Image (cartoon, rainbow, N blue to C red):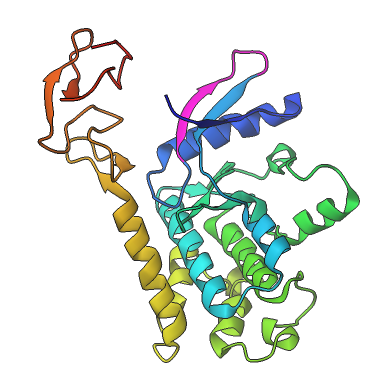
Amino acid sequence: PRLVTVVMAREEKGLPGLRRMGQIQHSLNHPAVVRTLGLNLDKNPPYLVLEHIEGPTLREVMAAEGRIPWQRASSMLRAVLGGLAHAHENGAVHGDLRPESVIAANDGSFRITGFGRRAGQAPRDDLLSDSLGDDEKSAVMDSVYFPRDPDPATPAFDVYSAGVLLFEMLTGGLPHGSEMPSDLVESLPAKADAVFRKSYTSMNLRFRDAGEMLAEFGRDRQDPGPESADADVRIRIVRSSRRCRKCGAENRIDFRFCTSCGSQFDARAVGTCSRCGRPLAADARFCTACGAKQ
């Protein structure tokens, strides 16, 4: 008994992207990536079930706040890069990273969704999200986030998009030509231009993947603001989840049992379900695995 998010393709051509989104996100296990709970392409309409994350998208945050200060923007981007780095290490490329793909969760974390491409696969038209509609303004904004890289796609594709994301957060607009964030916003640290310059560039000069881009933030220790913000993000992630010792799955910190294998996390649980045999808490009225009344 919990809230979930159900995703459906608006058109038939979006079904391959829906399938890849479900399969790729299901293969990733990181606090900054929205988890896949189910996928059913045989129903009409076909649908994908994701964990429900309460909070606005990064696009909605920027629309409400305008320009985001460097300290907060860099903290947000590092959280996103952490999830992307995990994906790149596991052979996945997001392929559609934009503010609409990042959820600013109410617990203070940032979660990525909308994965649609694996490294080594050629780009496809149906990977372009329909979430913004078909108006001209949205189409122009989408195109700026996608580099003109040769096929097949690599993690550097996402690096380019992350650079555009940083620029839009800092300036409130999209990059054009050779302008740097500091050309539009005064008092930005040199780090802002350095990270953007090495992401919003040709493929051979770009960071190779999100892990390399993330490491760039830690090379200059003279800027204490972003470093302290990064530490705060790490603390929130550690405290909001726990890893099951038996199967390795991530679970909320307040869960008593692993949602994947049913293993007990603490000693407060006693007994088992009369129907399925899963462990139960002493005060449980229903089994969390099969729903049987106790």
Outermost right residue = 136
- Tell me which segment is drawn in magenta: 35-45
Quadrant location of the N terminus? top left
Give the residue drawn at x 48%, y 25%.
Answer: 38
- 271 lies above or below 254: above
The answer, for residue 201, to whether it is visible in the render is no
- Residue 36 colored in magenta in the image: yes
Q: Position of residue 85 (x, y in %)?
A: 44, 58
Pick the residue in front: 107 or 135.
Answer: 107
Quadrant location of the C terminus? top left
Q: Position of residue 293 (x, y in %)?
A: 28, 10
Q: How many marks?
A: 0
- Residue 41 colored in magenta in the image: yes
For residue 179, what is the image quadrant?
Answer: bottom right
Give the residue drawn at x 29%, y 10%.
Answer: 292
- 134 lies above or below 77: above
The answer to whether 16 appears left or right of 126 in the picture is left
Give the residue drawn at x 40%, y 65%.
Answer: 233
Pick the residue in front: 1 or 92.
Answer: 1
Q: Position of residue 232 (x, y in %)?
A: 38, 69
